Amino acid sequence: MINLEKGQRGAVELPKFTVGLGWDVNSSDTGYDFDLDASAFLLGENGKILADEFFVFYNNLSSPDEAVVHTGDNLTGEGEGDDESLIIDLSKIDPRVKEICFVVTIHKADERRQNFGQVRNAFIRIYNPDTQEEILRYDLDEDFSIETSIEFGRIYKRNGQWKFEAIGTGKKAGLAEYLKKYN
């Protein structure tokens, strides 16, 4: 397994793998559960979503080519391990897709007065679903005190090979801002 730091890259050599995202919530009580949502944006050469159906999230659990499948929304983040997962099959991916960005947002963050400063142990990992072997992992160790969304990482194709890059960039924004960015 390779532990990545922000900005580092690693090769993704399996055609089928799972992207697991996880987090724990600090004991600060805002009166609401923390509902963090993982999303994937399948982007073309121009850095834009190919079509609305290529935005995979809790209301659209699969890309049209079935290369990216969201396993479902975890409304509380309770429990050990991955809180939300996306199953990736690069052998099915639309040839126009050059990049898949993974973003996690806090549902109703403003209304619930929540931010990533109240979240700890956040990570993204790529693993082989058959053997459970972790291939790449990026633990976000920054303190995101006001941010309500984080771009955890991206998988991109360069010279015919897929790679993962650890990004870890936060914003005080929701899903709508990422839709503007990638549309």
Image: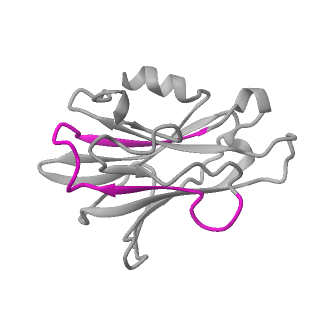
Residue 168 in sight from this viewpoint? no
Is 109 part of what is drawn in magenta? no
Is 93 part of what is drawn in magenta? yes
Magenta span covers which residues?
Answer: 78-105
Residue 74: image location, x then y, percent: 63, 52
In this picture, residue 155 sits left or right of residue 167: left
Residue 59: image location, x then y, percent: 51, 37
Instruction: Identify the image quadrant of the N terminus.
Output: bottom left
What residue is rendered at 64% in x and 34% in y?
A: 147
131 to 21, vertically: above or below = below
Residue 68 in sight from this viewpoint? yes
In this picture, residue 154 sits left or right of residue 170: left
120 to 48, vertically: above or below = below
Residue 89: image location, x then y, percent: 28, 57
Give the residue furthest to the bottom. 131
**Quadrant in the picture for residue 24:** bottom right
What residue is rendered at 45% in x and 56% in y?
A: 5
